[in-house]
Image: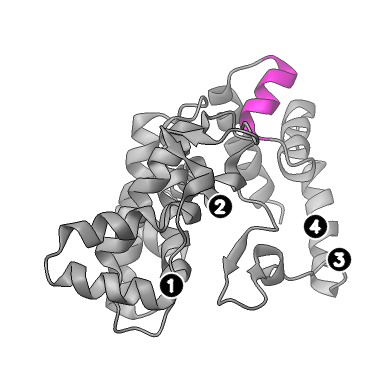
Amino acid sequence: MHKNKVEICGVNTSQLPVLTNEEMKELFARMHAGDKSAREEFIQGNLRLVLSVIQRFNNRGEHIDDLFQVGCIGLIKAIDNFDVTQNVRFSTYAVPMIIGEIRRYLRDNNSIRVSRSLRDTAYKALQVRDQLINKHSREPTVSEIAEELDMPREEVVFALDAIQDPISLFEPIYHDGGDAIYVMDQVSDEKNQDETWLEGIALREAMKKLNDREKLILTMRFFDGRTQMEVAEEIGISQAQVSRLEKTALSHMRKYI
């Protein structure tokens, strides 16, 4: 990202206006009354919000103009769906919408292509997840989703994993104008628990039952934190082969744990 660049998509970012909360409330009232100029003014007054969000994605290799345009789509969606009767700041509501739009764009334009069948499975799983939440008023397990789809649990796990966009531990997940809550604040540390110690022993014993290639793949994937693509490049096979070998190795290990 060109940090010193002033113009993005023909917009002079140094001259963008900033709206106060009172001004935004007034503009929302005018928009709801059908004033189209108020909508344009509201969008212009929140473009700095889009700029602040796209700074988080400046290491993805994407052109800043593209990210800005996608972020503006997220901003417009936030404007169209924002409920002024709720006691929530517009920025608090809009930022996740803008981030979500950019992530969808990055995922769909990722150089590591996810197969259509895997993507379809993941989206079906997400639909079933929402249906089960509405039905039971709780988060369903992966096993429940797999049962509903009538497919192996492992396939659902791999499909959902394939469409995930990795985020930083320092990604803010909530901000109300005070101290932000980050992803790392929601991650528990279980490394000193007795259960983890016992599980570690069981895993090491199960690993001994695998052949050298399977051990190498699982070590790189789950202990070194490598992606399937990185493992494939390291050992000279395709990502599909890594996926199959990983599934086989995990299946073997379950027999001994």
Q: Position of residue 12 (x, y in %)?
A: 47, 39
In the rendered structure, the answer to whether residue 86 lies left or right of residue 2 reads left
- Which of labels 3 and 2 is toward the front? 2
Asked whether the residues under the numbered discs 3 and 1 touch, taking CB atoms below 8 Å apart as contact, a structural biologist would say: no
Residue furthest to the front in view is 15
Mark 1–mark 2 Cα distance, whole angstroms, equals 32 Å
Depth-wise, is mark 3 or mark 1 nearer the camera? 1
What residue is rendered at 26% in x and 71% in y? 28
Q: Are marks 4 and 2 in contact (CB under 8 Å)?
A: no
Q: Which residue is mark 3?
A: 197
Residue 131 placement, left or right of 151: left
Residue 229 — which label?
none
Is 230 within the magenta? yes
Vertical arrangement, residue 148 with respect to residue 9, above or below = below
User: Which comes before the other along the chain, label 3 or label 1?
Assistant: 1
**Dot 2: within a 10 Å radius of its alpha carbon, few (fewer than 14), some, or many (20 or more) residues?**
few
Q: Residue at x 39, y 39 (%)?
A: 69
Q: Which portion, as a residue range, is magenta?
A: 227-236
Residue 220: tell me if it is visible. yes
Q: Which residue is mark 4?
A: 202
Q: Earlier in the sequence, mark 3 or mark 2?
A: 2
**Which amino acid is tagged 4?**
Ala
